[in-house]
Amino acid sequence: MNDRVELWPGSRYAVTPAGRAVVRADAEQHVAAVRETARAASMTWPGFGSGRDCGHLFDPTLMPHMARRADEVMHRLQTSPDLAHIDHCPPDALPYSPDDPHRQSLLFVHFVSAPDVLHVFRDAESMQCWLWAQWPTGHCNIRVCDVPPCPVTDLGTFIPVVRGQFQIWFEACPTCRRALHRTFDANYAAAVEAAWANPPIPRWARNA
Protein backbone atom coordinates (compact mmCIF):
# COMPACT_ATOMS: atom_id res chain seq x y z
CA MET A 1 0.00 0.00 0.00
CA ASN A 2 3.07 2.28 0.18
CA ASP A 3 2.80 3.03 -3.53
CA ARG A 4 -0.76 4.32 -3.17
CA VAL A 5 -1.98 7.83 -2.41
CA GLU A 6 -5.33 9.40 -1.53
CA LEU A 7 -7.50 10.05 -4.57
CA TRP A 8 -8.08 13.54 -3.12
CA PRO A 9 -7.23 14.97 0.31
CA GLY A 10 -9.35 13.20 2.89
CA SER A 11 -10.65 10.60 0.42
CA ARG A 12 -11.24 7.03 1.57
CA TYR A 13 -10.05 5.80 -1.82
CA ALA A 14 -6.38 5.02 -2.48
CA VAL A 15 -4.91 4.82 -5.98
CA THR A 16 -1.49 4.72 -7.58
CA PRO A 17 0.12 8.05 -8.45
CA ALA A 18 -0.39 7.26 -12.14
CA GLY A 19 -4.06 6.49 -11.57
CA ARG A 20 -4.51 9.72 -9.63
CA ALA A 21 -2.91 11.66 -12.49
CA VAL A 22 -5.37 10.12 -14.96
CA VAL A 23 -8.37 10.98 -12.74
CA ARG A 24 -7.08 14.53 -12.27
CA ALA A 25 -6.56 15.00 -16.02
CA ASP A 26 -10.11 13.76 -16.73
CA ALA A 27 -11.52 16.11 -14.07
CA GLU A 28 -9.62 19.09 -15.47
CA GLN A 29 -10.86 18.28 -18.98
CA HIS A 30 -14.43 18.07 -17.68
CA VAL A 31 -14.17 21.43 -15.90
CA ALA A 32 -12.64 23.05 -18.98
CA ALA A 33 -15.43 21.69 -21.19
CA VAL A 34 -18.13 22.97 -18.83
CA ARG A 35 -16.50 26.41 -18.66
CA GLU A 36 -16.21 26.65 -22.44
CA THR A 37 -19.84 25.58 -22.89
CA ALA A 38 -21.03 28.14 -20.34
CA ARG A 39 -18.94 30.82 -22.08
CA ALA A 40 -20.44 29.95 -25.47
CA ALA A 41 -23.94 29.98 -24.03
CA SER A 42 -23.45 33.34 -22.32
CA MET A 43 -22.21 34.87 -25.59
CA THR A 44 -25.15 33.49 -27.56
CA TRP A 45 -28.29 34.12 -25.54
CA PRO A 46 -28.39 37.83 -24.46
CA GLY A 47 -31.05 39.86 -26.18
CA PHE A 48 -33.17 37.10 -27.69
CA GLY A 49 -36.90 37.68 -27.47
CA SER A 50 -36.97 40.61 -25.08
CA GLY A 51 -34.27 42.70 -26.72
CA ARG A 52 -31.85 42.67 -23.78
CA ASP A 53 -30.14 40.51 -21.22
CA CYS A 54 -32.76 39.16 -18.75
CA GLY A 55 -30.41 37.71 -16.15
CA HIS A 56 -31.15 40.59 -13.76
CA LEU A 57 -34.80 39.49 -13.62
CA PHE A 58 -33.64 36.25 -11.96
CA ASP A 59 -31.23 37.80 -9.48
CA PRO A 60 -31.50 35.74 -6.25
CA THR A 61 -31.25 38.86 -4.07
CA LEU A 62 -33.45 41.29 -5.96
CA MET A 63 -35.86 38.81 -7.58
CA PRO A 64 -35.90 35.75 -5.30
CA HIS A 65 -39.29 34.50 -6.54
CA MET A 66 -38.02 34.37 -10.15
CA ALA A 67 -34.72 32.81 -9.08
CA ARG A 68 -36.72 30.06 -7.35
CA ARG A 69 -38.80 29.55 -10.49
CA ALA A 70 -35.68 29.03 -12.57
CA ASP A 71 -34.18 26.71 -9.95
CA GLU A 72 -37.37 24.62 -9.90
CA VAL A 73 -37.25 24.23 -13.68
CA MET A 74 -33.57 23.26 -13.52
CA HIS A 75 -34.28 20.67 -10.82
CA ARG A 76 -36.92 19.09 -13.01
CA LEU A 77 -34.65 19.05 -16.06
CA GLN A 78 -31.92 17.30 -14.11
CA THR A 79 -34.11 14.76 -12.31
CA SER A 80 -37.12 13.97 -14.51
CA PRO A 81 -37.04 10.59 -16.31
CA ASP A 82 -39.76 11.71 -18.74
CA LEU A 83 -37.89 14.32 -20.79
CA ALA A 84 -37.91 14.01 -24.57
CA HIS A 85 -34.52 15.03 -25.97
CA ILE A 86 -34.71 16.61 -29.43
CA ASP A 87 -31.25 16.33 -30.94
CA HIS A 88 -30.29 19.07 -33.42
CA CYS A 89 -27.04 17.38 -34.38
CA PRO A 90 -25.35 17.45 -37.81
CA PRO A 91 -26.06 14.43 -40.05
CA ASP A 92 -22.55 13.03 -39.52
CA ALA A 93 -22.62 13.31 -35.70
CA LEU A 94 -23.44 10.56 -33.25
CA PRO A 95 -26.97 10.88 -31.78
CA TYR A 96 -27.28 12.28 -28.30
CA SER A 97 -27.58 9.95 -25.32
CA PRO A 98 -28.27 11.12 -21.74
CA ASP A 99 -25.72 8.52 -20.61
CA ASP A 100 -22.96 9.88 -22.86
CA PRO A 101 -20.03 11.09 -20.72
CA HIS A 102 -19.39 13.87 -23.25
CA ARG A 103 -22.74 15.54 -22.56
CA GLN A 104 -20.95 18.29 -20.61
CA SER A 105 -19.76 19.74 -23.94
CA LEU A 106 -23.32 20.16 -25.25
CA LEU A 107 -25.79 23.05 -25.05
CA PHE A 108 -29.39 22.61 -23.92
CA VAL A 109 -32.42 24.81 -24.59
CA HIS A 110 -35.70 24.40 -22.71
CA PHE A 111 -38.96 26.27 -23.26
CA VAL A 112 -41.07 26.36 -20.11
CA SER A 113 -44.19 26.21 -22.31
CA ALA A 114 -43.05 22.70 -23.38
CA PRO A 115 -42.18 21.19 -19.98
CA ASP A 116 -41.25 17.72 -21.22
CA VAL A 117 -38.92 18.73 -24.07
CA LEU A 118 -35.20 19.53 -24.01
CA HIS A 119 -33.40 20.64 -27.18
CA VAL A 120 -29.79 19.51 -27.59
CA PHE A 121 -27.15 21.34 -29.63
CA ARG A 122 -23.51 20.60 -30.40
CA ASP A 123 -22.36 24.21 -30.76
CA ALA A 124 -23.44 27.78 -30.14
CA GLU A 125 -23.68 28.69 -33.83
CA SER A 126 -26.28 26.04 -34.69
CA MET A 127 -28.22 26.87 -31.52
CA GLN A 128 -28.26 30.57 -32.37
CA CYS A 129 -29.49 29.95 -35.92
CA TRP A 130 -32.29 27.73 -34.63
CA LEU A 131 -33.33 30.17 -31.90
CA TRP A 132 -33.81 33.00 -34.37
CA ALA A 133 -36.67 31.05 -35.94
CA GLN A 134 -38.53 30.47 -32.65
CA TRP A 135 -41.53 32.58 -31.66
CA PRO A 136 -43.57 32.82 -28.44
CA THR A 137 -46.62 30.60 -28.30
CA GLY A 138 -48.82 33.33 -26.79
CA HIS A 139 -49.25 31.53 -23.46
CA CYS A 140 -47.68 33.39 -20.53
CA ASN A 141 -45.89 31.27 -17.92
CA ILE A 142 -44.50 34.17 -15.86
CA ARG A 143 -47.92 34.94 -14.31
CA VAL A 144 -47.07 37.87 -12.06
CA CYS A 145 -49.77 40.31 -13.17
CA ASP A 146 -52.57 41.35 -10.84
CA VAL A 147 -55.41 39.94 -12.95
CA PRO A 148 -54.81 36.25 -13.76
CA PRO A 149 -55.26 34.28 -15.86
CA CYS A 150 -53.04 36.01 -18.39
CA PRO A 151 -54.60 36.56 -21.82
CA VAL A 152 -53.44 34.60 -24.86
CA THR A 153 -51.70 37.17 -27.02
CA ASP A 154 -49.50 37.51 -30.09
CA LEU A 155 -47.50 40.21 -28.29
CA GLY A 156 -45.75 37.91 -25.82
CA THR A 157 -41.97 37.93 -25.47
CA PHE A 158 -39.37 35.45 -24.28
CA ILE A 159 -37.67 35.97 -20.91
CA PRO A 160 -34.55 33.76 -21.04
CA VAL A 161 -32.16 32.87 -18.25
CA VAL A 162 -28.94 30.84 -18.33
CA ARG A 163 -28.02 28.12 -15.85
CA GLY A 164 -24.61 26.83 -16.96
CA GLN A 165 -25.13 24.76 -20.12
CA PHE A 166 -28.90 25.23 -19.94
CA GLN A 167 -30.92 28.09 -21.37
CA ILE A 168 -34.40 28.30 -19.86
CA TRP A 169 -36.91 30.33 -21.85
CA PHE A 170 -39.92 31.68 -20.01
CA GLU A 171 -42.66 33.53 -21.88
CA ALA A 172 -44.43 36.68 -20.69
CA CYS A 173 -47.52 38.54 -21.79
CA PRO A 174 -47.10 42.36 -22.02
CA THR A 175 -48.76 42.91 -18.62
CA CYS A 176 -46.54 40.41 -16.82
CA ARG A 177 -43.44 41.69 -18.57
CA ARG A 178 -44.12 45.23 -17.38
CA ALA A 179 -44.95 43.99 -13.86
CA LEU A 180 -41.71 42.02 -13.77
CA HIS A 181 -39.62 45.04 -14.71
CA ARG A 182 -41.48 47.28 -12.25
CA THR A 183 -40.77 44.80 -9.44
CA PHE A 184 -37.09 44.68 -10.34
CA ASP A 185 -36.82 48.48 -10.53
CA ALA A 186 -38.54 48.88 -7.14
CA ASN A 187 -36.39 46.20 -5.48
CA TYR A 188 -33.23 47.65 -6.98
CA ALA A 189 -34.10 51.16 -5.77
CA ALA A 190 -34.84 49.81 -2.28
CA ALA A 191 -31.53 47.94 -2.20
CA VAL A 192 -29.60 51.04 -3.23
CA GLU A 193 -31.38 53.14 -0.61
CA ALA A 194 -30.65 50.53 2.06
CA ALA A 195 -26.98 50.43 1.05
CA TRP A 196 -26.70 54.21 1.38
CA ALA A 197 -28.51 54.18 4.72
CA ASN A 198 -26.25 51.45 6.13
CA PRO A 199 -22.80 51.95 4.61
CA PRO A 200 -20.14 49.34 5.40
CA ILE A 201 -17.85 50.18 8.30
CA PRO A 202 -14.21 50.63 7.18
CA ARG A 203 -11.91 47.90 8.42
CA TRP A 204 -9.74 50.38 10.34
CA ALA A 205 -12.79 51.54 12.33
CA ARG A 206 -14.31 48.17 13.18
CA ASN A 207 -12.25 47.68 16.36
CA ALA A 208 -12.13 51.33 17.31
Image: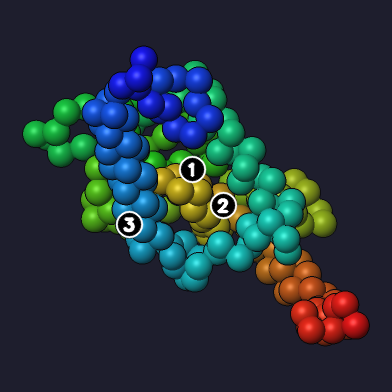
Other-residue count near label 2 (Cα within 10 Å), few / some / many at <14 / 14–19 / ≥20: many
170 in relation to 83, above or below = below
What type is the residue that disc 2 sits on? Glu
Image location of residue 151, percent across then percent down: 67, 51
Q: Quadrant of residue 90?
A: top left
Depth check: 203 or 180 in front?
A: 203
User: Do the residues under discs 2 and 1 have CB atoms within 8 angstroms?
Assistant: yes
Q: Which residue matches tag 2? A: 171
8 in relation to 157, above or below = above
Image location of residue 52, percent across then percent down: 49, 70
Depth check: 126 or 12 in front?
A: 12
Other-residue count near label 1 (Cα within 10 Å), few / some / many at <14 / 14–19 / ≥20: some
Q: Which residue matches tag 3? A: 40
Quarter holding the C terminus is: bottom right
At 83% from the left edge and 80% from the top edge, which residue is drawn?
201
146 in relation to 68, above or below = below
Cα distance between the residues tagged 2 and 3:
23 Å
Using residue 179 as the reference point, say whether residue 97 is left or right of it.
left
What type is the residue that disc 3 sits on? Ala
Q: Which residue matches tag 1? A: 111
Image location of residue 191, percent across then percent down: 79, 74
Residue 179 in sight here: no
Farthest left residue? 92
Q: Nearer the viewer, mark 2 or mark 3?
A: 3
Q: Nearer the viewer, mark 3 or mark 1?
A: 3
Secondary structure, mark 2, is strand
What type is the residue that disc 1 sits on? Phe
Cα distance between the residues tagged 2 and 1:
8 Å
Depth check: 47 or 27 in front?
A: 27
Using residue 68 as the reference point, say whether residue 172 is left or right of it.
left
